[in-house]
Structure formats: C-alpha cells, structure tokens
Amino acid sequence: MDNALSINHLSYTYHSINGETNALEDVSFFVKQGEFISLVGPSGCGKSTLLNMIAGLLPVQQGEILIQEQPLRKSQKTIGYMLQKDHLLGFRTIYKNILLGPEIQKKCNTQVKEKADALLKKYGLYQFKDSYPKELSGGMRQRAALIRTLMIAPDILLLDEPFSALDYQTRLNVSDDICKIIKEEKITAILVTHDLSEAISVSDRILVLSKRPATIKATLPITFSIPTNSPREARTREEFKDYFHLLWKEVEDENENTN
Amino acid sequence: MKTQISKTSSPPISMQQQIFLKKQRKKHHQIRFLQIGLLFFLILGWEIAADTDAIQAFIFSSPSRIINCFFVMLKEYALLHHMWITVLETLLSFLLVSLISIFLAIILWWFPTCSKVLEPYFVVLNSLPKSALAPILIVWLGNNMKTIIIAAISVAIFGSILSTLSAFVSVEGEKLKLIKTLGGNKWDCLRLVVIPSCIPAILNILKVNIGLCLVGVVIGEFLAAKSGLGYLIIYGSQVFKLDFVMLSIFLLCLLAMILYFSLQGVEKHFKGHF
Ligand SMILES: Nc1ncnc2c1ncn2[C@@H]1O[C@H](COP(=O)(O)OP(=O)(O)OP(=O)(O)O)[C@@H](O)[C@H]1O
Ligand SMILES: [Mg+2]
C-alpha cells in the first residue's frame, strides 16, 4: 500500500533581516495509512515548521513532500491541522464554528450538517451546539476544535501540541478522548508533543528530532503485546515504562549534545 | 409577580449578595442624583447671577434669555431649518467617512506594501489641524454644502482609516492561519475573521467619527455657510446677539449627545459575544 505521507530530504531555511535560520535539514520519513506518529524534540528545533510545510502553509524549498505518492501541490487530499490553541471564533456559536471549513469550501449542504450533528452528539457537545465558545470549558473547546477539523474530512491530521494549553488533569482526559476519536475515525495523524508519556501512550511510532536544524535522530516503534485504542490503558501497561526509559535516553542524549 | 418568580430559575441570592446589590444600586442612584443636582445648581446659579447683575446678561446671557431666544428663533429665524442642516451635514459626512475609511482600510490591509508607502502621508495628514484646510477648500469648492461636508470628512477620515487599519492588522495571525488550514484564501480571512472580530473596534471608531464630523461641520459652517448652527454662532457673535450664540452652543451639545447615544444603542445591540 502507498504511504499516506512521505517526506524526502526536506530542508527549510527562514530568512529575515537578522539573518537566516536553518530550521530543517534533510528530514526524511514516511507515515503509513492510518498510522499515528508523534514527533518529539527540543524546543525551537523546527517541529512546527515541519507541520506548517506539510499543511502547505510554507513553500517547499528543498526536497519533497508526497501525499500518497503525489506531490503536495497536486494532491487532492485534505490535510487537517489542529493548532495549540483552539482558536474558536468568539462571535460564532459552536455549531457555526465547526461548520467553518465546509462554509469556506462552499459545501454546507444537509449531508454536511447531519455529519456535524452526528459528531457533536457522538462527542458530547450536542447540547452546547448553540452556545458560544466562552461558555465552554477548555477541554470542551479543544474537542470542538477537533470536530471542526474532522468536518473537512482530513486524510491526514496534524496536531501541534494541541493539549499544552490545558491543565494536567484535563489534558489527560482530553488527550485520551481525542486520540480515541482519531483512532476510531482511522485517520492518519502526526502529533507534536513535549510530553514523552503522551507520545508513548498514543502513537504507533515516535520520531525523535535533533536540535535545530532538525533531522530525524531516532525512530521508536511502539507495540504493546495486547493492542489498545485507549491511551489511558496504554499508560498502565508493563511495556510503557520500558518505552519511557528508551525515549528518555534518546531525548536526554540530544539535550546533552546541546550543552 | 408569581409568574415572574417561576420563570427565572436562577439560584436564590444569598443575603450578603442582596445587601451588596442594594448598596450598589443606592450608590448608582446617588451619583445620578448628584449629576442632575449639579446641573440644576449651575443653571440656577447662572440665572441668579444674571438677574442680580453679578454678570452681564447681555454678554453672558442667561437660561431664561436662552429659552426666550429659542421660541423667538423658532418663529423668526427658522431655527429648525438650521438644526436640520447641521444634522444633515453631520450625518452625511459621518456616513461617507465611515464607508470610505472602512473601504480604504480593507484595501490597505489587502496590500501591505501600499499601506507601508502611504503610512507617513496618513500620519502627517492626521496630525495636521484640519481647520487649516477649510479656507483652501472654500477656494477650491466654493461657498456651499459640498465644502462643509468635505471639511467635515477631512477632519475625521485620516484618523479613522489609521485606527481601522490598526484594528485589522492586530487580528491574531494564528486565526488567519486557521482559515488557511481549512482551505480558505485571503478573502475568507477578511470576511470570516478580520471584519467580524473588528466590529467592536469599528463601533468605537464610529463613535469618535460622529463627534469629529460634528466638529468639522461647525468649522465648515463658520467659514462657508448661510445656514446651520455654526452659521448661527458666527452670525450671532457678529451682530452681538450672544443669546443666539449660547442657544446654538446648547443645541450643539444636545445634538452631540443624541448622536453619541444613538450609536451607543447600536453598539449595545451588537455587544455580547465579542
Ligand atoms: N517566521 C519565522 N521567521 C524566522 N525564523 C523563524 C520563524 N518561525 C520560526 N523560526 C525559527 O525557526 C526555528 C524553528 O521554529 P519552530 O516553530 O518550527 O520550532 P518548534 O520545534 O515548533 O518549537 P516549539 O517546540 O517551541 O514549538 C526556531 O528557532 C524559530 O526561531
Ligand atoms: Mg512549535
């Protein structure tokens, strides 16, 4: 089967008055259909840059990005992007917020509206349909943001530290919720996170990036002897601790190289 | 009474909260009372001072003379017509300023290079005392209503463009990124995020504009008019009828207040979710 996404020898340099910043250097990896990948790496190493490029927000300077073996620009596939903050628009109701994507793409028909209703019901936000974002808790808002992203039926979902604005308790619950949703919908996903245990509990594979300019430093496949869709359950597994030590060592090595 | 209680399902208010609310209300009433009382005393003081010749009523006028003057002018000087002209000019220039400045701000937001090039021009024009332009406008455009409206526009427009643009530019970049991730283009950014999230700022700018337009209209009427409250002020001072002047100033105050509060009404209507 084709890879959902392959990145080949990708480099990126920012230019500004104060000089140039080499953010990515020769990054290559692939993501299989339905796979959940996490990216971890030191702060400022270029993780967001990488996601922005996959989302098509930054031009490809060197190397290539292939979506199902098609160049990014030519590909008809949809890429969803969930940012760190929910960015729900305060002057729109939750319902109108999650219909933002279809509204932009002028596909706001009854079928789409039924889908919106179904997703809201499924993920427990239906009664808040006509509420405004400020009336919702942080976790609910993040779920609404995910539904907004799911409404454009993404083939690949990018998540850039989507839980980091939440407090620890909420974060555990919401990341559990959201990762279950993503796995249920069988969406190919790439998650950027600083939280190693989060990365282990949700992903099929973890990529460790080096400090800037980012390159792939290590790849860590995660397989539990009894597969689970629940990150919460994954955290309780015996293998979890071993993976944590492994990953910790990789990340620590990277930090030592920095100093 | 009963139906009212059963309708509101809010939890019962605690004793302390009730006391607090009562105090708050009392304070509010107190302030209103003092405000009105102060006005009453100022007017009364003015009247007494004029009646007892502590000040010269001929120069300083007095409340009773102003009221008299109001009725005389209604009959003999077509006061309503003058008021109407001033209101009309103010509203026309306000409408034009608002439309033009929002339109130009959109253009400048769309073309950042354009806005960078023009910025120093706008800043200089904005800080220029616009009354200095009025004489030139008269020469260029003649002694008519067009001149007055353009004078009023010139007073408000530059500041309005600059503040509208800065509101547009200050919209969070991440929100625009969101629109792009959902497949939107620049037009979608503008109509879905930039304009709706700037509505509170725009309403504030409109409130400033209406005041400035009134200033501009009065400046214009001072120099180039045969009607309007500004004309009455100049005319009154030239023929030394200070009652005319005082009455016109009072009516201008009233007008400014009415215009401001009607906009505030519109603002209240929009408030809530911003
Ligand atoms: N628009 C830009 N112009 C110039 N340099 C930039 C720009 N955006 C990011 N950078 C630089 O590129 C580098 C990588 O940034 P990026 O945001 O991709 O890091 P990150 O891995 O997402 O960091 P974090 O974990 O803190 O989110 C940083 O050093 C940053 O300073
Ligand atoms: Mg980042």
Image: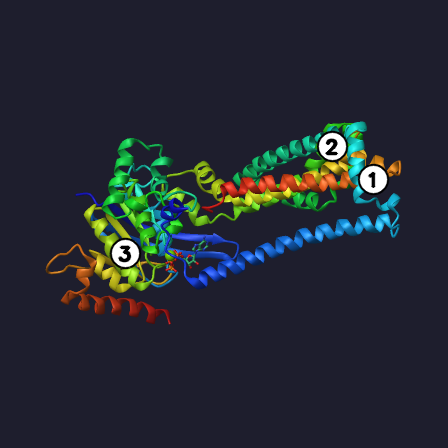
Q: Is residue A70 visible?
A: yes
Q: Does residue A145 lie above or below A109 as drawn?
A: below
Q: Does residue A215 lie above or below B177 as drawn?
A: below
Front label number (1 vs 2): 1
Q: Chain of mark 2?
A: B
Q: Chain of mark 1?
A: B
Disc 1 marks a residue whose amino acid type is Asp
Say which mark, if any, is on residue B148: 2
Mark 2: give few (<14), some (14-19) or many (20+) Cα within 10 Å. Answer: many
The residues tagged by marks 1 and 3 sit, at their Cα atoms, a distance apart of 72 Å
Q: Nearer the viewer, residue A197 or A254?
A: A197
In this image, A207 relative to A44: left or right? left
In this image, B57 relative to B140: left or right? right
Disc 2 marks a residue whose amino acid type is Ile
* Residue A254 in picture, x, y percent from top left: 31, 67
Q: Is residue B112 visible?
A: no
* Residue B164 in picture, x, y percent from top left: 57, 43
The residues tagged by marks 1 and 2 sit, at their Cα atoms, a distance apart of 25 Å
Say which mark, if any, is on residue B243: 1
- Residue matched to label 3: A174
In this image, A53 relative to B263: left or right? left
Furthest toward the left, the residue is A226
Say which mark, if any, is on residue B72: none
Q: Nearer the viewer, residue A26 or A200?
A: A200
Disc 3 marks a residue whose amino acid type is Val
The structure residue drawn at horizontal position 36% and vertical position 35%, both measured from the top left corner, is: A103
Mark 1: give few (<14), some (14-19) or many (20+) Cα within 10 Å. Answer: many
